[in-house]
Amino acid sequence: MLTLTHYLILSFTLFSIGVAGVLLRRNIIIVLMSLELIFNSVNISLAAFSYFLRSLNGTVFVIFNITVAAAEVAIGLAILVTVYRARRTVNVDEIDELRG
Amino acid sequence: MIFNNAAIMQTLNVNLNAVAPVALMTVLAIVLMVIDFFLKRENKFSLGIVTLIGLVLILPVAATTVDPAPAFGGMVIADAYAAFFNVVFIIAAIFAVVISNDYLRKISSERGEYYYIIIFATIGMMVMASANDLVNLYVGLELMSLSFYILVAMRRSATGAEGALKYFILGAFSSGILLYGITFTYGFAGTTNLTEIARMGVNLSSANHYLLIAIIMLVAGFAFKIAAFPFHLWSPDAYEGAPTPVTALLSVGSKAAAFAFFLRFFGGAFHEFHAHWAGLLWILSAATMLVGATVAIQQKNIVRMLAYSSIAHAGIILIGVVVMNGFASAGVMFYMFVYAFMNMGAFTVVALMARNDGTGKSISDYKGLAGRRPVLAFVMALFLLSLAGIPPTGGFTAKFFILASAIEARYYWLAAIGVISTVISLFFYAKVIFYMYMKEPDALDDMAPVTQAPSTLAYNIIIFITAVSTMVLGLCPTPVMDMAIAAVSHL
């Protein structure tokens, strides 16, 4: 029998992997994928809470989240294209003109 | 129909009046999108005029839309508090649009989408200020953030794209953390509605591990949005990379929107748990004030200096959130109101000083400005002194209200750190004034006209309005402060 805790542990694991990916990986494409992972881990815990609390708010929230995440990734990729055109690189370490 | 329509309408409380300002702004944005479609590239400036007229017409509607009853099933609340912040957002948007027209020509990036994305960002802020539900808050927050990512990337230079990329990654990351916090708020309260969460809080025993995770995550997510230490790293880069009018709107609008929700959330929904979150915010506030003021000293670029100064300001405004009584909350609102004018004014001078090739943003470019343009140097000095908190400017009154509320509530150490931060920040504000009045310009080419703009009229109008408002708010703060106190009394 799967309990709420199982889903929360799954969600927390995915969230941690996502956070680690954003903080540690140098390739922006991977960073964007890690961001998606964070959003989806949140969706899992929202859906789980929604199911176990017998409340619909969480499910509605998940649908909003998916929509917003789609818009977010579209803008992220657009910015990435602009950066790539200017710098010819997708490595975070090499994008360091602004300092201070 | 199985359901009784009238009964459903009553529970939902469909009140179109409550969302009138947001609806009108959306109409304005759509109208701009349609007009943009028919305009030639060289006529895009007329979109700015349409935007300006629209915003000026919507401003009185936003100021008068006051309805303390939650509408749309408790999702939206258009109280006096929301109206106050809506006015701040629209004023900031008006200033940004007016100075954009000429600035976009300078960086030769006259694009129609610029104007309606500014409107969309403002709509996001307004949704945040009047949100009474976490779903609504999140959608408003993302509408604002996504619009700002695009606006920061608008100047398609390498620095613009780099600033936008850093802002995007850290912004999306912070949204994820915030969202995780919202999840756990939902998990322990069983609802996303702020009124119901507040009701839940009264009955709940304090030891709840979901609650602690929720508080830590929410505070971290919001600290990103207001650029508090240690989550401030995106802000100088985004500020420097963005077109200056966008920087001005970003520093005023997004901060005010985040604080608007901060106050409503921690003052309303989580008020019962003050003991749990106040300590965390105390540390955040103290660290932000000190780091912002100290790092600003070594900046060579005026935009980066103002970015760190706005970080220090965020720390001082956070004092009001930590104290969290009626007077402190009103102090935060008053601070945001004054900040909108003085910071917009300072950024307008920066936009005016910027040259066509993108230079002119270094502090050393301000050397000897008093000799060449005495009036401009004088108002810049006024804005900087106001930001530093010198009487009789608005910045002094705003800081005074916040620090007085902290002392009244016996937060002596926090107030002391606030004063220390103000003293440190005087150092870098005074440096610019010193450069303007005491130093000779570096080379002869600096004697060339500061701006080749066809007309500086737009800048002059904004500088005049912001300068007068900064002084008036310093000399007679009572009307605005009374409005703020009345607005928080219903919170």
Image: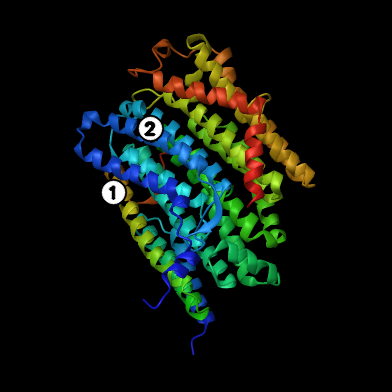
Image-based side of B474 in relation to B166, left or right: right
The amino acid beneath tag 1 is Val
Q: Nearer the viewer, residue B466 or B155?
A: B466
Q: Nearer the viewer, residue B277 or A93?
A: B277
Residue A70 lies, with reference to residue B428, above or below; the image says below
The amino acid beneath tag 2 is Leu
Image-based side of B353 in relation to B343, left or right: left
**Image spot of residue A16 (x, y percent):** 49, 67
Image-based side of B203 in relation to A70, left or right: right
* Secondary structure state at the residue bearing disc 2: helix
Q: Residue B9 carries which label?
A: none
* Secondary structure state at the residue bearing disc 1: helix
Label 1 crowd bin: few (<14), some (14–19), many (20+), radius 10 Å = some
Name the residue tied to disc 1: A81
Label 2 crowd bin: few (<14), some (14–19), many (20+), radius 10 Å = some
Residue B476 seen anywhere in this rendered image of the structure: yes
Q: Looking at the image, which residue is at 53% across and 58% down?
A: B70
Direction bottom: furthest residue: A1
* Distance of label 1 from label 2 (alpha carbons): 32 Å
Q: Looking at the image, which residue is at 65% across and 27% down?
A: B474
**Image spot of residue B263 (x, y percent):** 61, 51
User: How many numbered marks are there?
Assistant: 2
Name the residue tied to disc 2: B52
